[in-house]
Image (cartoon, rainbow, N blue to C red):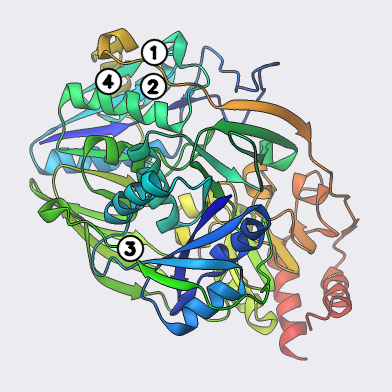
Amino acid sequence: MSVWVFVESSEGGPASAGLEIMSRARELGEVTAIYLGSASDEVAATLGDHGAARVLVADPGDRLAAAPVAAALAARAESEQPQAILFAQTYDSRDVAGRLAARLGVGVLSNANAVRLTDSGAETDHEVFGGTEIATAAIEQRPAIVIVRPKSYTAEPAGGSPAAVETLDLPDAGAAEAKVVESHAEEREGPQLGDAKVVVAAGRGIGSAEAYEMIERLAKPLNAATGATRAIVDSGWVPYSKQVGQTGKTVKPDVYIAVGISGAMQHLVGMKDSGTIIAINKDPDAPIFSVADLGIVGDAGQVVPKLIEALESR
Amino acid sequence: MRVVACVKQIPDPSTPYKLEEGTGWLLRPNDQVLDDTDRYGVEMGLQIAQANGGTLTLVSMGPTGSAQGIRQALAMGADKAVIVDDATLRGADALTTARVLAAAIGKEGFDLVITGTESTDGYAGVVPQMLAELLGVPSLTYATSVEASSDQVKIHRQTVTGYDVVTSGLPAVLSVTAGVVEPRYPTFKGIMDAKKKPLETLTLADLGIEAGPAQEVTGVNPAPEREAGRKIEDDGSAHLAIIELLEQKKVI
């Protein structure tokens, strides 16, 4: 069985969301990694260590990856006929997966928390209704294209030798192509939301956009990343990059502190697998309390400043 | 300039969703609302159409029902709506949806197609990209800000660490994140006008295509429940309980 895993790059190496899926892929068959970025011995070593026998390197340069990479992968998939191609539910991966599937004329299973191969395709489990129910979906096709939510599997080295490196030539689409003309990194203190051991997140219950400063202050002594609900992202209080939940990021930190978050289904699905959940909310009946290990019924504006003071004075 | 915004009617998210016994498909009531995430694309489309002397057409797929959700988007100011409503589309997957939308959009003609990032009820998250591939145009995705002229579009595209500036010529497909613009609220006049605006209903036969196989949902089971822990009322010292737990978990 040949299984391909699409791996994005992050800070010059394979991104964790891709490596997580490699852990599952190597149980399913022989793994080829598709690496989006530029090749190096280190990249080949890391991907090999996580179970890839081979890496196809796709480097789009200043072109937006989706169209040229999907075109090249479609041609390769038609000649090699892999059983499945697995993607992470992240920006570039989703773009390539969507265009690739349309090009090959095959369906996609999205939002997978678990993936299994079947005789004629694949089946996945995905959470519905905020994770209260798990639906199993199946497709019968080759390749089976599956998009896996981050944190569904754990990235663990398996001790393999470096992957054999091959370059994936990208076709020229001419002038009609999207180009990346500049890249900007947001100034961020502390860890990335997806990787942080502690996450402090806020919802509408904090009262105002200005009150989010309190969340950032709380995050600092905990070395936490800051997150948000869709409600306050839609209100423009914080950028979309901070959104946790169904239409945002999935996080699984050791500790998740939910401040002024009622716990809508769409939010719970993105954080309910956190190790320990602490919730502060005025409404004693807020659904967030049903998943919280420690629930504080109280005003965030009262509790959080005291908490910050106690942490900062340590 | 011909601007198209893709919109979807969904069951009101504040009501409990139900799946149909047997198929596992979402049950859709007669009255569905406009997916909140689509309001951003509609607003963006209105602004671009206005600035470049163009029109905004809404394209949708699904049971028309009372068309309440589509009228919401028309009330914001869109010129007309096309909805593909066909019984064989029940349980349609992302690719079928993209094929149907692409056929309807191709029939209308377009310079710029605007979509949300993913729908709230289905959230496969790949329809914009599929649509672009099927229409044979670039896909500029996850836009957090947009500038469009009559022959070019330039966006800030969300990335894990910040944003990229991405440009392409037209025609193109653009997917926008919530917060890209502030959607307007329909005025009373807008709501009244929306009742008279053209709403065209098409079947698959009208488009000359057939529905693909539906994605098969083979089972729906309750997830293992996470148990609630203790809940305390803040008496001015609740922060100490948090400190204690953080110490216990060795975070501090």
Check the residue under mark 2 and report the chain it is in.
B
**Left or right, residue A136 beside residue B118:** right
- The x, y position of residue A192, in whole percent, is 55, 73
The residue type indicated by label 2 comes to Met
Q: From the viewer's side, name the closer residue of B31 and A114.
A: A114
Residue A244 placement: quadrant = bottom right
The residue type indicated by label 4 comes to Ala
Q: Are marks 1 and 2 in contact (CB under 8 Å)?
A: yes
Disc sitting over residue A28 in the figure:
none
Q: Choose mark 1 or mark 4, whichever is in front.
A: 1
- Provide the residue designation for mark 3: A168
**Left or right, residue B114 beside residue A107:** left
Residue A225 placement: quadrant = bottom right
Tag 1 and tag 2 share a subunit:
yes
The residue type indicated by label 3 comes to Leu
- Provide the residue designation for mark 2: B61
Q: Choose mark 3 or mark 2, whichever is in front.
A: 3
Instruction: Describe the element under mark 3 as helix, strand or loop.
Output: loop
Q: Are marks 3 and 4 in contact (CB under 8 Å)?
A: no
Q: Tell me the residue at 41%/31% (across/down).
A: B95
Real-space CA distance between mark 3 and mark 2, rounded to the nearest whole angstrom: 37 Å
